[in-house]
Image: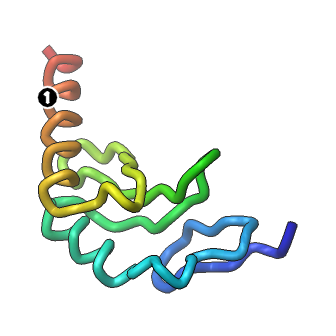
Amino acid sequence: MTAPQSLPDSPIHSYSEFPEPSIDLARLRLNVEAGGARWLGMQEGRHELLVLFNDPVTGNTLSLRSEDVTAATVSAKVRECRIRFERGQS
């Protein structure tokens, strides 16, 4: 296990050697923001790298596997979150 490695502009870090060379952080961040969310960073999951982001309306923290992040998938995840949030509020 190595020491934590901070990612650029991100409070989230992991105890492994990443990001992998194949990870394009700028593209991931742009897709998160284009999908209507606030970028938080990345975190190592059990078997994959997760991209973490906040829904600016509900404040909930959401995640997607890094390979699944597009503006459309982020937008869909935010939409689902808001629907669940509204149901819980009524």
Residue 39 drawn above or below residue 47: below
Q: What x and y, as percent, mark residue 19? A: 56, 77
Which residue, given by chain and number where applicable, does mark 1 sit on?
83
Q: What x and y, as percent, mark residue 51? A: 42, 60
Residue at the image point whose x is 40% and y is 80% from the top: 25
Q: What x and y, as percent, mark residue 58? A: 24, 42
User: Is the C terminus in the top left, top right, bottom left or bottom right quadrant?
Assistant: top left
Furthest residue toward front: 22
Residue 64 drawn above or below residue 24: above
- Front-most of 47 and 10? 47
Furthest residue toward top: 90
Residue at the image point whose x is 32% and y is 72% from the top: 28
| 9 sits left or right of 3 in the view | left
- Front-most of 21 and 75? 21
Determine the image quadrant of residue 13: bottom right
Residue 57 drawn above or below residue 27: above
Residue at the image point whose x is 14% and y is 28% from the top: 83
